Amino acid sequence: MKAISKGSLVHRPALHYGIIVLALIVLSVFSSLGLARFGYTSILPQMQDSLRLTNTRTGTLQALNLLGYLLTVMGAGMLAARFGPRIVVSTSLLIVSFSMLLTGLVPSFSAACIARFLAGASGAGGNIPAMGLVSAWFGKRRRGIASGIGVTGSSIGLMVTGLLVPAIMTTYGPDGWRVCWYVLAGIGFAVFVLCALFLRNSPHEKGLQPIGQTAPETDENNDKQECSPFHWRSVYASRIVWQLAFLYCAFGFSYIIYATFFVRHLVKEARFSLSDAGALWMSIGFVSLSSGFIWGSLSDRFSRQVALLCVFTLQGISFVILGLSQTTTAVYVSSGLFALTAWSIPALMAALAGDIVGPRLAPAALGLMTIVFGIGQALGPYFAGVIADATQSFSPAFVIAGAVALLCGAGGSLLLREKRLPHNSMSGTP
């Protein structure tokens, strides 16, 4: 027995390669979303003044970014399922870095539209297949936690942009917003290099089993049957996938209004300085590092449904508070609630995708859910910009975002069938 134990220890790697893959997933999300999408939030006030953009146009730019994401998210998931995530993620990250560089070079609103659309289109390929890798590298009992860690890339993006953007703008003056995009592009290129070199599609490429898999799981066997010859219909016909897609749409519409115009609202309406607003945005990023981990872990321990209900309720309250009051106390309470829940919904959806259809088809299921999410996400900023121009304030838009989170998100979570959301995983067939 002792010899066997020693032999097993000899062949056990000091660090499971899945940890490296998870770190690369975090970096991929960091570049695709944290920099390319949420970097716009911190840069927006000076960019708006420099290009003389109305609120509607600032909303349109973010809407085009999200429209690009929407139009390519399904294809990104399908390509990753067929050819493997590594090549899709790496190629997309290269384009993401180029699009940020292009955004810094734009001379006008029209050119900015093209750059923001490209950033969104490539961001889908860097985010969806990367998050889909969680199902391949982690067993069911670790999937929620791993997904929660993966989405912290967005939090890191908030921290980096909240720290860098005010400093760069102070140093470079009116053109500081352009320098910001150049710096973010350079960081994004470094992430591309790392993923191209070290990302792997599955544990089998390294002769390993998924982390947390103590015995052969049904996922692996089901995948062999489902993936030949890629039964897309089993994904698209799943009732639970469509129910979750609706909830994801409500999240997309509501959170993006808050995340896009938070800094702008503080600077233009709540009388915060750009440095103070940036510092608070960075603090949100720091606190939100734990959001996906906390709620993913709770969903593993209890149920995905309970986690969804709690998150939507807290986010709805956060958005309504910011819309109803501009006092310092209200701003900090709102930002705290958002930070604690910020990226938990994407983490839960990534975990659920693997639970429903298995690791191999998880990118396709997540792609379908995300395309519906993308519709709400693309409509949110444009809608908020129009409302802001009509009322001269983003406050009404924040209140509406909160109502959507509470009524559609939390309310829709209550309507999910409990028997289809058992503890730890979903056992219903698609």
Image (spheres, rainbow, N blue to C red):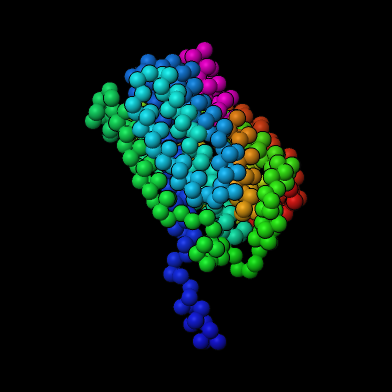
Residue lying at 48% horizontally and 43% vertically, measured from the top left: 126
Query: Can residue 51 be seen at all in this image of the molecule?
Result: yes
Q: Quadrant of residue 189?
A: top left
Residue situated in front as seen by the camera: 93 or 422: 93
Secondary structure mostly seen in magenta is: helix
Where does residue 271 sit, x and y in percent of width and height? 37, 23
**Which residue, as the protein is rendered here, is positioned at the far left?**
171
Q: Is residue 393 visible?
A: no
Please determine whether, in this image, residue 13 is positioned above or below residue 141: below
Q: Is residue 384 magenta?
A: yes
Question: Closest to the observer: 122 or 79?
Answer: 79
Q: Is residue 277 above or below residue 430?
A: above
Q: Nearer the viewer, residue 116 or 290?
A: 116
Along the line of sight, which residue is nearer the eye, 345 or 51?
A: 51
Residue located 69% across and 45% down the image: 232
Q: Residue at x 51, y 26 (%)?
A: 63
Q: Kindly indicate the quadrant of the structure image that contains residue 141.
A: bottom right
Image spot of residue 7 (x, y percent): 49, 81
Quick check: 216 left or right of 275? right
- 126 vs 168, left or right, is right
Which residues are drawn in magenta?
376-400
Q: Position of residue 284 (x, y in %)?
A: 43, 39
- Let me know if residue 426 is in the magenta part: no
* Quadrant in the picture for the N terminus: bottom right
Instruction: Give coordinates of residue 390: x percent, y percent.
Output: 52, 12
